[in-house]
Image (cartoon, helix red, strand yellow):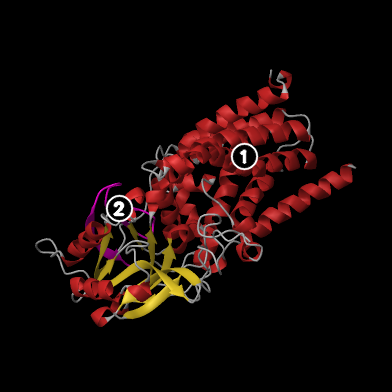
C-alpha cells in the first residue's frame, strides 16, 4: 500500500502523521501521541525502498510536525498586522520547511547507509537534532525531548541531557516501528518493549519533594502586551504597576522577599537614561534585592542586559545577553552589510543588539549565585553548561509577549524546565506576560502566575541538588555514541559495497 503512493502522496501522508505528533508539545502535552506518530514515521521509513523515498517521508513528517508545533511563530507578525501580517504565513512555512529538511536528511542518510535495515535511523535522526541545536547558532525548539518534561522520561535529562533523551525516544520509535531481522527480536522490540516505553511517556514524575531554602523570591509579571509595551500613554501604567507589585507587603504570615525579579526589558529607558527610574525601583524594593532587564547602550552598541540593583538604585551587577535571536535582535553579518549601507539590525551602526561576552554568574549574597538567562538563552542546554562555575540557581527573565497567547509561551516554559532538570537546579522565571514560575530541580512548577495576567508571586527558593551527570559531562558522551553508531553503519555499508 505505502509503496504504491506517489512521492507527493507519501509526503502528504507523512505530514499528516507529523501534525498529529506535534500534539506531544505544549499546550497539549500528549507525549505518548508523539511517540506513536514517530513509530508510524519509522514504519514509513522502513517501507521506503530508496533514499529519495525515505527523504520524502522524513521531510513530510517534519513539515507537518513543525507547522503545528511552531505555529506560534506567526504571533510577532500580528503585533502590527498592517505592516507585517502578510509575512506571517511565509515565516511559518519557511521555518517549518527548514526544520523539516533536517529530518528529511536523517531519513535519507539512514536509508543510504542501510538499504535493508532500519537501525541507522536512530543515530541519524538523533544526530540531526544535535545539528539543529548548534548549526547557524541553533534552534532546537520542539525537539522530542521537549515533550517529556511532565513525564518520567523527562527525568532522563539529568543523566543524558536533551540529545540523550532524543536518542532514547527515537530508539524506542524505531524498535517498535521497524521490524527486526529475527522473529525473537521483533517480539522483543515491538511487544515487550512497547509497554515500558509507552509507560515512560505517560507516567508522572516520581521524585521526592524538593527541599526548600529559607529565602523567598518575588516574581513580577506586568502583563504588558507587545503592541502596548512602548506606547507612551501605557509606559507609565506598566512601570507604576511593577513598582506597586514590588512594594506590596507579603501575604499574612509570609516573609518579606529576599529577591525581586522583573522581566526582560522591564523598563523602556536605556540604563544610562534611567537613573531616576532605578532609584524608584530600589526604593520600592526596600530591603529586598531587585534584578531586572533593560537595554544598555555603550557607544554605538546596544546590549540586552540584566542588572542587579544596589542601595539607592546603583547598578551593582550586570549581565549582557550573549546568545541573540537571529533576525530578531540582529542580522547575521549585519556589520558587514552595514558597510554597504544596509544597516537594519546591524550591531555596530544599526538598531541591532550586540552580544555579551558569554555566560556569567551574578552573586545574590545569602541566596547564592545565579546564572542569568535572558529569554532565548534558556533554549540552549549547552549555554547553561557553559557557566564558568556551578550556580546555586537559575534566573530566566523573558518577554514572551512576542510568542502569542497559547503554544509559544508554554513551550518556552517547557524548555526552561528542561534546563532545571538537566542541571538539578531551581529556576526562577519572570515573564512579562507569563508564564512566571518557580521551578524545582526536577522541573516541576511549584508556583506560577497564569498566562496573560498581571500580578506577582512570592515563592520559596528550592535548594539545589548535587550536580547531575549531564551537568558534569555535557553533550560530548551522547555525541560520541551517535558518531560511533554512524561509523559502524558506514563501515557496514562499505563492506557491502
Q: Farthest residue toward the left? A: 252
Q: Which residue is located at x 80 percent, y 48 percent?
A: 490
Of 75 and 456, nearer the camera is 75
Q: Residues within 10 Å of mark 1 (few under 14, many from 20)?
A: many
- Look at the picture and state if 345 lies above or below 213: above
| Mark 2 vs 1, N-terminal side | 1
Q: Farthest residue toward the front? A: 341
Q: Which residues are magenta?
A: 435-463
Residue 224, label in figure: 2
Q: Answer left or right for 431 relative to 473.
A: left
Q: Secondary structure at mark 1?
A: helix
How far from the left and from the top, in percent, is residue 296? Answer: 42, 71
Q: Which residue is located at x 36 percent, y 54 percent?
A: 207
Instruction: Please name the residue that numbered disc 1 is placed on.
Output: 97
Q: Quadrant of the C terminus?
A: top right
Magenta span contains residue 82: no
Q: Answer left or right for 266 relative to 190.
A: left
How far from the left and from the top, in percent, is residue 432? Answer: 32, 55
- Observer-side mark, 2 or 1, equals 2
Q: Which residue is located at x 17 percent, y 69 percent?
A: 256
Amino acid at each position: 500500500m505505502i509503496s504504491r503512493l506517489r512521492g507527493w502522496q507519501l509526503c502528504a501522508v507523512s505530514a499528516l502523521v507529523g501534525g498529529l505528533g506535534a500534539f506531544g508539545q505544549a499546550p497539549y502535552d500528549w507525549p505518548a501521541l508523539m511517540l506513536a506518530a514517530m513509530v508510524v514515521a519509522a514504519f514509513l521509513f522502513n517501507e521506503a525502498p530508496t533514499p529519495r523515498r525515505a527523504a520524502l517521508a522524513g521531510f513530510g513528517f517534519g513539515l507537518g510536525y513543525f507547522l503545528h508545533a511552531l505555529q506560534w511563530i506567526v504571533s510577532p507578525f500580528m503585533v502590527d498586522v498592517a505592516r507585517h501580517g502578510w509575512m506571517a504565513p511565509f515565516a511559518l512555512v519557511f521555518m517549518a520547511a527548514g526544520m523539516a529538511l533536517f529530518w528529511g536528511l536523517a531519513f535519507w542518510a539512514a536509508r543510504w547507509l542501510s538499504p535493508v535495515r532500519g537501525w541507522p535511523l536512530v543515530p541519524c535522526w538523533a544526530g540531526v537534532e544535535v545539528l539543529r541545536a548548534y548549526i547557524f547558532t541553533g534552534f532546537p525548539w520542539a525537539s522530542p525531548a521537549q515533550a517529556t518534561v511532565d513525564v518520567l522520561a523527562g527525568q532522563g535529562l539529568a543523566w543524558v541531557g536533551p540529545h540523550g533523551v532524543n536518542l532514547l525516544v527515537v530508539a524506542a520509535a524505531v524498535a517498535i516501528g521497524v521490524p527486526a531481522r529475527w522473529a525473537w527480536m521483533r517480539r522483543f522490540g515491538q511487544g515487550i518493549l512497547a509497554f515500558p516505553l509507552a509507560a515512560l511517556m505517560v507516567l508522572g514524575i516520581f521524585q521526592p519533594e524538593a527541599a526548600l531554602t529559607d529565602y523567598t523570591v518575588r516574581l513580577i509579571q506586568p502583563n504588558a502586551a507587545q503592541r502596548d509595551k512602548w506606547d507612551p500613554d501605557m509606559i507609565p501604567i506598566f512601570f507604576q504597576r511593577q513598582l506597586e507589585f514590588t512594594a506590596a507587603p507579603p501575604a499574612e504570615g509570609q516573609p518579606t522577599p529576599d529577591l525581586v525579579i522583573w522581566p526582560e526589558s522591564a523598563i523602556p529607558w536605556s540604563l544610562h537614561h534611567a537613573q531616576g527610574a532605578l532609584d524608584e525601583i530600589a526604593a520600592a524594593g526596600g530591603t529586598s534585592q531587585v534584578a531586572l532587564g533593560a537595554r544598555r547602550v555603550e557607544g554605538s552598541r546596544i546590549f540586552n542586559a540584566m542588572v542587579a540593583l544596589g542601595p539607592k538604585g546603583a547598578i551593582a551587577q550586570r549581565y549582557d545577553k550573549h546568545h541573540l535571536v537571529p533576525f530578531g535582535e540582529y542580522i547575521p553579518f549585519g556589520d558587514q552589510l552595514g558597510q554597504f549601507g544596509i544597516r537594519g539590525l546591524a550591531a555596530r551602526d544599526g538598531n541591532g543588539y550586540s552580544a555579551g561576552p558569554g555566560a556569567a554568574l551574578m552573586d545574590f549574597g545569602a541566596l547564592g549565585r545565579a546564572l542569568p538567562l535572558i529569554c532565548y538563552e534558556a533554549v540552549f542546554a549547552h549555554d547553561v553548561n557553559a557557566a564558568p562555575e556551578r550556580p546555586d540557581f537559575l534566573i530566566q527573565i523573558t518577554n514572551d509577549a512576542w510568542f502569542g497567547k497559547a503554544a509559544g509561551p508554554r513551550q518556552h516554559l517547557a524548555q526552561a524546565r528542561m534546563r532545571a532538570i538537566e542541571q538539578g537546579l531551581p529556576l526562577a522565571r519572570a515573564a512579562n506576560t507569563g508564564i512566571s514560575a518557580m521551578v524545582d530541580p526536577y522541573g516541576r512548577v511549584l508556583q506560577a502566575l497564569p498566562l496573560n495576567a498581571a500580578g506577582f508571586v512570592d515563592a520559596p527558593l528550592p535548594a539545589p541538588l548535587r550536580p547531575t551527570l549531564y551537568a558534569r559531562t555535557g553533550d560530548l558522551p551522547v555525541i560520541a555514541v551517535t558518531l560511533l553508531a554512524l561509523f559502524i553503519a558506514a563501515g557496514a555499508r562499505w563492506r557491502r559495497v
